[in-house]
């Protein structure tokens, strides 16, 4: 049984019909159930009833009522894993927590994933009235994430993210020698659906949406460069596609990288996307004080940098 959930509509979902938006979030969710929610007014957007023809807009907050899918198995993670998650919490108060998300864990269940990060955190904090994702990271990406513990705080962060008042700073290890001259990437991006159903993002100067990323060199190695990347727009896979567009793909990027280039690292035991949300900064919802949080690399990334 999934409890009441609130989903924030990303910019890349802008204009999508409400039923298709939900099917994209929960692949096993029957359309008949979605339409029943809409008829009864149980599914709401920005606290209002909508029709099945409603098209979502970036920043919309979609309320999904509790539901159970028969084929879903209830997965309970072990106490050891819960202890591991506890060790990744960088900060926590009554309003929100900041967690250093591990690589390899999806942020929520759905699309073939039964138990994601948010479901496991709810198991870790069973007495918390509400735990919701304020934003997302790809399954393969690690680092800072905001988890809201109240609806009002969730709304605050959604608005702050929409206004670009939350700054996200990423670290990425890329192939090759990044040029000091490339400090900003301004290439429009467009999502594509491949024939076999996979979604992919490509540079599209004609029909793409604006995408802007700042890049700064942190450290150079013989065949690699550690860079800092700050996205100024919120496009799907923005950093990964932008870096690849300049022929410097992130190491071990299975979707946008070059497999042959990764073989050297894989032979050394490293086989994960080196993209890490290293820092978050924003104004605290209560004090309005500007604060920031930094997430250390995991053991794999630290070991690789030492090796290089």
Image (cartoon, rainbow, N blue to C red):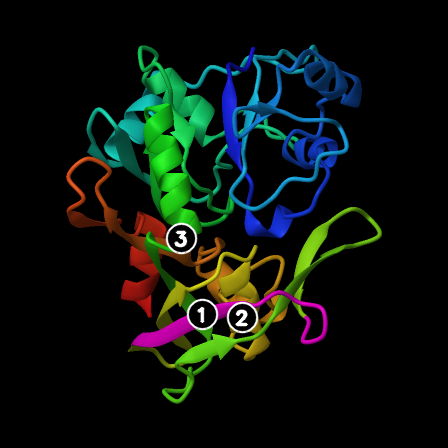
Image coordinates for residue 138, horizontal then vertical, percent = 51, 47
Q: Is residue 90 left or right of residue 257?
A: left
Residue drawn at x 73%, y 31% is: 19
Label 3 CA crowd tier, 10 Å (few <14, some 14–19, many 20+): few
Q: Secondary structure at mark 2?
A: helix
Which mark identifies residue 276? none
* Front residue of 188 and 296: 188
Q: Secondary structure at mark 3?
A: loop
Image coordinates for residue 290, horizontal then vertical, percent = 18, 51
**Which residues are drawn in magenta?**
204-218
Q: Given this view, does label 2 or label 3 mark the residue nearer the observer?
A: 3
Which mark identifies residue 163? 3
Q: Which residue is mark 1?
A: 213
Q: CB of mark 2 within 8 Å of CB of mark 1?
A: yes
Residue drawn at x 31%, y 38% is: 99
Image coordinates for residue 280, horizontal then vertical, percent = 29, 51
Q: Residue furthest front?
A: 48
Q: Residue furthest right?
A: 195
Q: Secondary structure at mark 1?
A: strand
CA gap between label 2 and label 3 equals: 22 Å
Within the image, what quadrant is residue 216 found in? bottom left
* Front residue of 231 and 218: 231
* Residue 135 among magenta residues: no
Q: Residue furthest bottom?
A: 181
Label 1 CA crowd tier, 10 Å (few <14, some 14–19, many 20+): some
Residue drawn at x 48%, y 41% is: 104
Residue drawn at x 68%, y 16% is: 37
Does 138 sit above or below residue 22? Answer: below
């Amino acid at each position: 049984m999934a409890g009441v959930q609130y989903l924030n509509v990303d910019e890349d979902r802008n204009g999508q019909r409400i039923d298709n938006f939900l099917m994209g979030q929960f692949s096993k969710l029957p359309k008949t159930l979605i339409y029943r929610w809409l008829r009864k007014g149980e599914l709401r957007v920005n606290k209002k009833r909508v029709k099945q023809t409603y098209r979502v807009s970036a920043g919309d907050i979609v309320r999904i009522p509790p539901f159970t899918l028969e084929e879903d198995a209830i997965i309970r993670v072990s106490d050891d894993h819960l202890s591991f998650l506890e060790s990744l919490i960088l900060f926590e108060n009554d309003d929100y927590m900041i967690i250093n998300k591990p690589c390899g864990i999806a942020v929520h269940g759905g699309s073939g994933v039964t138990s994601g990060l948010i479901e496991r955190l709810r198991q870790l904090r069973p007495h918390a009235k509400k735990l919701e994702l304020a934003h997302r990271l790809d399954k393969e990406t690690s680092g800072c994430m905001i988890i809201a513990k109240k609806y009002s705080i969730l709304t605050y962060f959604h608005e702050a993210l929409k206004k670009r008042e939350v700054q996200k700073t990423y670290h990425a290890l890329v192939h090759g020698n990044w040029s000091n001259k490339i400090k900003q990437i301004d290439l429009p991006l467009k999502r594509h659906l491949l024939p076999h159903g996979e979604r992919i993002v490509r540079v599209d100067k004609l029909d793409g949406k604006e995408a802007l990323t700042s890049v700064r060199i942190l450290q150079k190695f013989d065949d690699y460069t550690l860079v800092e990347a700050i996205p100024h727009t919120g496009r799907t896979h923005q950093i990964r596609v932008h870096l690849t567009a300049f022929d410097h793909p992130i190491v071990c990027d299975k979707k946008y990288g070059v497999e042959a280039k990764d073989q050297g690292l894989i032979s050394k035991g490293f086989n994960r996307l080196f993209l890490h949300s290293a820092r978050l900064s924003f104004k605290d919802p209560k004090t309005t004080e500007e604060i920031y949080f930094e997430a250390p690399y995991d053991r794999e990334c630290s070991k690789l940098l030492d090796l290089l």
